[in-house]
């Protein structure tokens, strides 16, 4: 059956991975399972700024009912060449909002669009889906403990002022081993940096999702999985 016929017949999901094959491949695996086992079709929205022959080849090798749309190139002339990747990504995501809106509106007209699913850095795009009345979910590429860390980071950020490496006690995440501040993500180690501010902003945005998909399973992380369920009043269902 032709791809065009498949996308109009089956329920359709729009995925948006952050740049890099490490983000694209997990979402592609999820899309393949939905397509092959649950009769969905899918479209990947990708950032042209980070496109590569490897990415193009990978996308073209996917199941016929998985298509892709390249978002327009985003000029970054005002961003210093020395800027961290997080700052570049923040600019690309925020400046892509109108293009994502156009792509989702078009898919809504041409497919049975039932969900929009960006991955962990795409929270700024969730309001676009809400505006278009499209169900919207986050896909968290890492595990349950990492998700708990990010969900709790905004509260820790507000409750403390020192650098995280200088925290007098390890950070106690429910259901997890204590996490010393010196082992936090490198991106948040300088609390005065724009990169750290953006990460905290992104994590606050998780509450805008209708649900969060996490790339893990209960038997591998029983404590963290239970904690996510017990905290269901504090964040979207996981």
Image: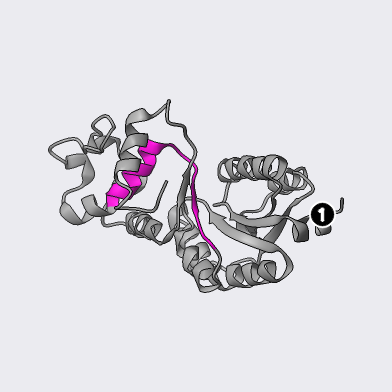
Residue 185 in view (yes/no): no
- The front one of 191 and 97 is 97
Identify the residue at horizontal 12%, vertical 38% (top origin).
Answer: 168
Identify the residue at horizontal 36%, vertical 29% (top origin).
Answer: 222
Magenta-colored span: 135-153
Q: Is residue 145 left or right of residue 128?
A: left
Q: Position of residue 34 (x, y in %)?
A: 65, 44
Q: Position of residue 18 (x, y in %)?
A: 54, 52
Q: Give the residue at mark 1.
A: 3
Res 82 quadrant in image: bottom left
Q: Residues within 10 Å of mark 1 (few under 14, many from 20)?
A: some
- The front one of 81 and 121 is 121
The residue furthest left is 168
- In this view, 217 is above or below 67: above
Identify the residue at horizontal 57%, vertical 59% (top origin).
Answer: 116
Res 7 quadrant in image: bottom right
Q: Is residue 201 left or right of residue 180?
A: right
């Amino acid at each position: 059956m032709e791809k065009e016929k498949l996308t109009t017949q089956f329920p359709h999901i729009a995925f948006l991975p952050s740049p890099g094959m490490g983000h694209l491949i997990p979402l592609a695996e999820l899309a393949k399972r939905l397509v092959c086992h649950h009769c969905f079709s899918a479209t990947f929205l990708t950032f042209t700024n980070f496109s590569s022959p490897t990415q193009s080849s990978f996308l073209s090798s996917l199941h016929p009912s998985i298509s892709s749309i390249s978002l327009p190139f985003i000029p970054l002339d005002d961003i210093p060449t020395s800027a961290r990747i997080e700052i570049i990504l923040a600019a690309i995501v925020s400046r892509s909002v109108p293009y994502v809106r156009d792509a989702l509106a078009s898919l809504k007209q041409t497919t049975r669009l039932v969900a929009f699913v960006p991955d962990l850095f795409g929270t700024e795009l969730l309001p676009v889906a809400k505006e278009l009345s499209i169900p919207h979910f986050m896909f968290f590429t890492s595990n349950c403990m990492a998700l708990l860390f990010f969900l709790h980071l905004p509260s820790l950020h507000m409750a403390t002022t020192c650098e995280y490496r200088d925290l007098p006690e390890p950070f106690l995440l429910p259901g997890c081993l204590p996490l010393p501040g010196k082992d936090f993500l490198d991106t948040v180690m300088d609390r005065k940096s724009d990169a750290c501010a953006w990460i905290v902003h992104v994590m606050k945005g998780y509450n805008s999702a209708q649900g969060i998909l996490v790339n893990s399973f209960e038997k591998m992380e029983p404590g963290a999985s239970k904690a996510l369920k017990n905290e269901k009043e504090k964040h979207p269902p996981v």
